[in-house]
Amino acid sequence: MENQYNYYNPEGQQGNAQYNNQQNFNGPEKKPKQKKKMPKAVVVTGCALLFGVVSSATFITSNIVGSKLLGLNDSTVSSTKTAAPVSNASLTKTSNVVTSDVSGIVKSVMPSVVSITNMSVQQVQDFFGGVSQQESKSAGTGIIISQNDKELLIVTNNHVVEGSETLTVTFNDNTSLEADIKGTDPAHDLAVIAVPLSSISDSTMDAIAVATLGDSSKIQVGEPAIAIGNALGYGQSVTTGVISATDRESTTTDQMTGETKTSDVKLIQTDAAINPGNSGGALVNASGEVIGINSAKLVGSSVEGVGYAIPISDVSDIITNLMNQKTKTKVAEADRGYLGITGFDVTSEYAERFSMPLGVYVTDVSNGGGAKDAGMTKGCIITELNGTTIDSMNTLQEQLKYYAKGEKVKLTVQVPGNSGEYVEKSYDVVLGAKSE
């Protein structure tokens, strides 16, 4: 009960006076001076404060020592940073953005593209075995590639102009004019036709342009491709896609003979739609340059998303040769010249099996004919006539329609040598009249 005297007494000194009087009443008595004890709550609080100070000092000291000795200068900073949020994935973008708007390219190229209409006469056999002639009309496309002093030159596919009696070219301003064949190459399905400059008006000349040719050897798979042509004969139209592949082999089947031929020119494959009528049209890159000549003949009816074009750079020499040939106009049948030979086609199958060149194998040379007089003998194979590739009897007969009797033509032939290999020779043949 000692500690009750230490509490604060609101009565002040009155309690103490009573206590003193009591002490005086009992007489003086000396007692040893007692030490005041600190309350337990104060002691516990003090110990807690002391422990906290010591712990903090120890923690700070350890951080400082760790930072100095171990180089952990950013440990306290990094502990307060929050993790950066994970951003959503996004496509890498560049400044060269390819858009679907090709109107500017088309506008610059369209004046150099023409529509071609082929009017031909075909022999049709009726039910009773009779043969009659029937006029046939087909459509294609061409590309204006050059101009000389007298003519505007247009490249197209050979099958577009094959067998034509009349060729009509329709320009960008819808003007239609007749054209003549300059040169053909059936083996590569190429042809060059010419329109006389004298027949073209000044307004039409202002509306058309010569195409800019690109370098097809530099094209890459995946780059944009634009096909322009007279699809289905409805007039010029545009389809777009990409270069699907390069260096594709192509085989074509002759509709008359059923023979399948493989071209030695590797083709460009594209998913831009190439329909009948697009043949001979332009395959254009993103710079507006012609990189290929489209050919719908190389696509089957069951195929979708696959089109082919002849690479312009691979056939530039052939096109140049065709442009430099003499312009051909068909001669009336009564005035046409003849070689005086008989023969048959050396197909690709024969050529591979017997190691023979493609062309026309001469089985007989008529007496009194131009070939006999020039020194030709049977067993040789005709491969060219005046620079035009001859790959079949049909091609040879088609070319002879442009020459009159009495004219001289240059035949390139392959003659079998003693070792079995063929040797190339040339003969200048004066065409004779048709033998009765």
Image: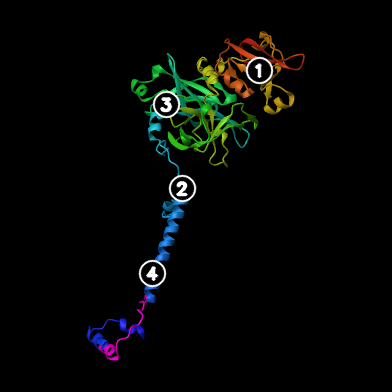
Answer with mark 2 or mark 3, whichever residue precedes in sequence: 2
Q: Of tags 2 and 3, which is closer to the observer?
A: 2
Residue 375 located left or right of residue 60: right
* Secondary structure beneath label 3: helix
Q: Position of residue 327 (x, y in %)?
A: 50, 16
**Mark sitting earlier along the chain (4/1):** 4
Left or right of 336? Residue 57 is left
Q: Amino acid at mark 1?
A: Ile
Q: Identify the residue position indicated by label 4 in the image.
A: 46
Nearer the camera: disc 4 or disc 1:
4
Image: magenta residue range: 21-38
x%, y% of residue 391?
Answer: 63, 23
Disc 4 residue type? Gly
Up the image or down, 18 lies above or below 388; here it is: below
Left or right of 39, for residue 16: left
Please report the residue visible at 54 percent of the width from the left and 42 percent of the height from the top. Answer: 304
* Sequence-wise first label, 1 or 2: 2
Q: Disc 2 and disc 4: Cα gap in Å?
A: 33 Å
Residue underneath mark 1: 382
Going 36% across and 23% down the picture, which residue do you hit?
204
- On the rendered image, what quadrant is the C terminus found in? top right
- Label 4 SS: helix
Front tag of 3 and 1: 3
**Which of the pair 246/338 is nearer the observer?**
246
30 part of magenta stretch: yes
- Name the front one of labels 3 and 4: 4
Q: Cβ–Cβ below 8 Å for labels 3 and 4?
A: no
**Which amino acid does the dot numbered 3 rest on?**
Ser
Task: Determine which residue is flagged by label 2.
Answer: 68
